[in-house]
Image: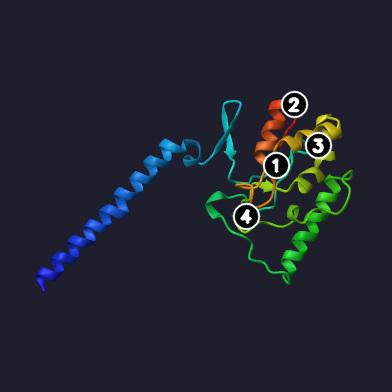
Amino acid sequence: MKREMAIALRMTLVTLILTGVAYPVFMTGLAQALFPKTANGSMVTAGGKTVGSALVGQAFSSPAYFEGRPSAAGANGYDASASSGSNLGPTSAKLHDRVTATVDSLLAQNPESSGPVPPELVTASGSGLDPHLSLQATLWQAPRVAASRGIPLEELQRFVGTRLESRDFGLLGEARVNVLLLNVALDAHYGRPSASGG
């Protein structure tokens, strides 16, 4: 019995060292060597400051910036440490009220936008932190952003088109726009708006 216990303890210790220490250290070192930007969270800098991660959505309140999807992560949304959806179903009165209020708010903020509000601008993603929008949802906001920045609408629409990310490996997902990267690119190209709440 003592012999079996000693073997079991040695195997547990070896397994713990291999899978709990050696493997994570090796994979972390490999990721740092091959993909350092991605391994460190795909952080985005602007003006010498870190402004966020390209992998995590965030709130923008200034009319001079494009807004991303709503977030249900954390008490006030966009909390990367509390990634989750709202878990509210299609029969939920709370979801209906929230969507109705969001639609009303978006229509008030974007009076020049044509067509209905794109669904992704009123519904949170499964993680609550999706940093992307479709081209349609991004361009729907373009009249507001163009007016706020004093940019011709057609010029801004072309600029947004240059920020379009293609499908992964040409097959997976849909073409999309990363809202943070687009807003950072707007500031880099056109300058920061004088009064920004984003």
Q: Residue at x 79, y 57 (%)?
A: 101
Q: Residues within 10 Å of mark 2 (few under 14, many from 20)?
A: few
**Residue designated by label 2:** 190
Q: Mark 1 touching mark 4, by CB under 8 A?
A: no
Q: Give the label on residue 157, or none.
A: 3
Please tell me which of labels 1 and 4 falls first in the chain. 1
Front label number (2 vs 1): 2
Question: x, y (%) of residue 98?
Answer: 75, 60
Question: x, y (%) of residue 77?
Answer: 63, 52
**Residue designated by label 1:** 60
Please tell me which of labels 1 and 3 falls first in the chain. 1
Question: Is residue 191 in view?
Answer: no
Q: Quadrant of residue 186?
A: top right
Q: Residues within 10 Å of mark 4 (few under 14, many from 20)?
A: many
Number of callouts in the render? Answer: 4
Going by the numbered disc 2, the residue's amino acid type is: Tyr
Q: Give the label on residue 128, or none.
A: 4
Q: What's the CA distance linking mark 2 and mark 4?
A: 30 Å
Q: Residues within 10 Å of mark 1 (few under 14, many from 20)?
A: some
Going by the numbered disc 4, the residue's amino acid type is: Gly
Q: What's the CA distance linking mark 4 and mark 3?
A: 27 Å
Please tell me which of labels 2 and 4 falls first in the chain. 4
Q: Secondary structure at mark 4?
A: loop
Please tell me which of labels 4 and 3 falls first in the chain. 4
Please tell me which of labels 2 and 3 falls first in the chain. 3
Q: Residue at x 41, y 36 (%)?
A: 33
Q: Secondary structure at mark 1?
A: loop
Q: Secondary structure at mark 3?
A: helix
